Amino acid sequence: AFLELHTFSSLNKNFLRHYKKTMKHADIAIVYYDQHTLDMKKMEDLDIDYVKRCFAHPNMLSINDREILADIAHQITNHTKGNVLLMSSGNWSGIDLVSIVS
């Protein structure tokens, strides 16, 4: 499961704790946010380890680099069989994840 944090609330450091165990049924959880989005919204920086702790998922990656996101998506879909869930109110920093995971 891929989740992009994009809205003011989802990027809010104090709100992130409400995501605890929300991805517990995902075999692999990927949470992505774009530093540029934080900058444009004039929001506080997020630490990738803090984001990971908030979700409390043992197989979660927290990513804030679009190139790493694309690489991880390629790796997961090329080596894993099953369903891929994409959740976002953003645009994955312009990456066409649908094409990558299809």
Image: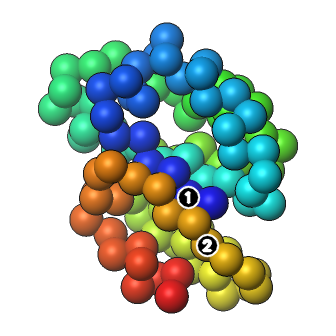
- Looking at the image, which is closer to me, 18 or 46? 18
- Colour scheme of this structure image? rainbow
- Residue 9, image quadrant: top left
- Looking at the image, which is closer to me, 11 or 66? 11
The residue at the point 40 percent across, 53 percent down is 88
Which numbered marker is on residue 84? Answer: 2
Q: In the rendering, at what x and y percent does residue 44 appear?
A: 34, 17
Question: What's the amino acid at mark 2?
Answer: Val
Q: Is residue 42 above or below residue 36?
A: above
Q: In the rendering, at what x and y percent does residue 101 appear?
A: 52, 81
Q: Secondary structure at mark 2?
A: loop
10 Å neighbourhood of mark 2: few (<14), some, or many (≥20)? some
The residue at the point 51 percent across, 88 percent down is 102
Question: What's the amino acid at mark 1?
Answer: Phe
Q: Mark yes or no: residue 18 visible.
A: yes
- Looking at the image, which is closer to me, 21 or 12? 21
The residue at the point 61 percent across, 72 percent down is 84
Q: In the rendering, at what x and y percent does residue 42 appear?
A: 19, 20
Q: In the rendering, at what x and y percent does residue 75 appear?
A: 64, 78
Q: Secondary structure at mark 1?
A: strand
Q: Is residue 1 above or below residue 34?
A: below
Callout 1–callout 2 Cβ contact below 8 Å: yes
Q: Quadrant of the N terminus?
A: bottom right
Q: Is residue 31 above or below residue 43?
A: below
Q: Mark yes or no: residue 68 visible.
A: no
- Residue 77, image quadrant: bottom right
* Farthest right residue in view: 58
* Farthest top residue in view: 14
10 Å neighbourhood of mark 1: few (<14), some, or many (≥20)? many
Query: Which badge, 1 or 2, is on the more N-terminal residue?
Result: 1
The residue beneath circle 1 is 2
